[in-house]
Amino acid sequence: MTTLARPKRNVSLAVQVSDQMRELIETGQWPLGSRIPAEHQLSAELGVSRNTVREALRSLVHVGLIEARAGDGTYVRADSELSATLDRRVRRSSMDEAFEVRSMLEERGARLAAMRADATQLERLGEFLSARDTAREHGDTAAYVEADVAFHDATVAAGGNALLTELYRHSAAAIAETVARSTDVRQRPDAPGLVRTEIDELHHALFDAIVGRDPDAAGRLAAGLIEESRRLSAQSVAADPAS
């Protein structure tokens, strides 16, 4: 595990400190959502003043990597500047825009996955799909959303395009929101679990197309899946105007 090192004196101390903190965030040693050490602890470990630490922290707050919560501490908000920038932009976007971007990324990702996914990646896709089905049957919405997002993330990752995968992963908040919205109208009124609908069939058909190495079908099914998710989301909003 990387530890903080005392900075060199011939370079701006605050810049060196912020660079080290950025590395800890980007490598996951300060995980997303975690609370980072207090100023006095960082100051002692680094051998610099608290003012220097405070300046370094302010620079990371400015780019959106961390956020200070009054009376609670400072937390990791994003794991890269790209993620922070996209998160801010997504929060200003409409749900329709989020669906459109998701469709473009996933359609291409699915096509590439059908051409490039290896056996291990296909196995993981199957596991996420199974977990999604189980969560749906038990009405565990949180687990359902988690498994659904993991399935789509793994699909894009299986395409082997690192930049596409990174862009997709940094849009995760918006993607999870679209998935959650589409579950609202599928709650069973008389029993646990979510109603099985066309969107579930599309997930399985997409998986089969990827396994069958059919990029055209995979792309078409991915796009159709997003359109069905958009329809369910719109239905959810119509049923609850306050949302």
Image (tube, rainbow, N blue to C red):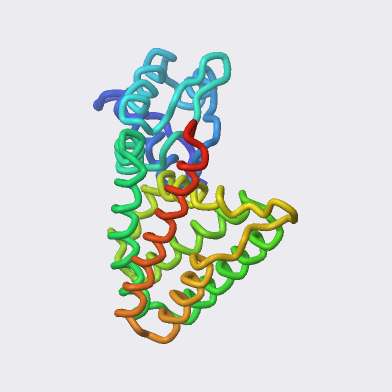
In the image as oriented, which residue stretches furthest toward the bottom? 212
Residue drawn at (68%, 63%) of the image = 137
In the image as oriented, which residue stretches furthest toward the right? 191
x then y, percent, for residue 78: 41, 38
x then y, percent, for residue 125: 51, 71
Residue drawn at (39%, 65%) of the image = 157
The picture quadrant where one finds residue 193 is: bottom right
Q: Is residue 12 above or below residue 102?
A: above
Q: Nearer the viewer, residue 57 or 217?
A: 217
x then y, percent, for residue 9: 30, 24
Q: Is residue 181 above or below residue 69?
A: below
Q: Nearer the viewer, residue 147 or 54?
A: 147
Q: Nearer the viewer, residue 35 or 95?
A: 95
Residue drawn at (38%, 37%) of the image = 22
The answer to whether residue 77 of the structure is visible from this angle is yes
Q: Is residue 130 above or below residue 50?
A: below
The answer to whether residue 115 of the structure is visible from this angle is no
Q: Is residue 229 left or right of residue 136?
A: left
Q: Is residue 53 left or right of residue 197?
A: left
x then y, percent, for residue 34: 54, 35
Q: Is residue 127 left or right of residue 220?
A: right
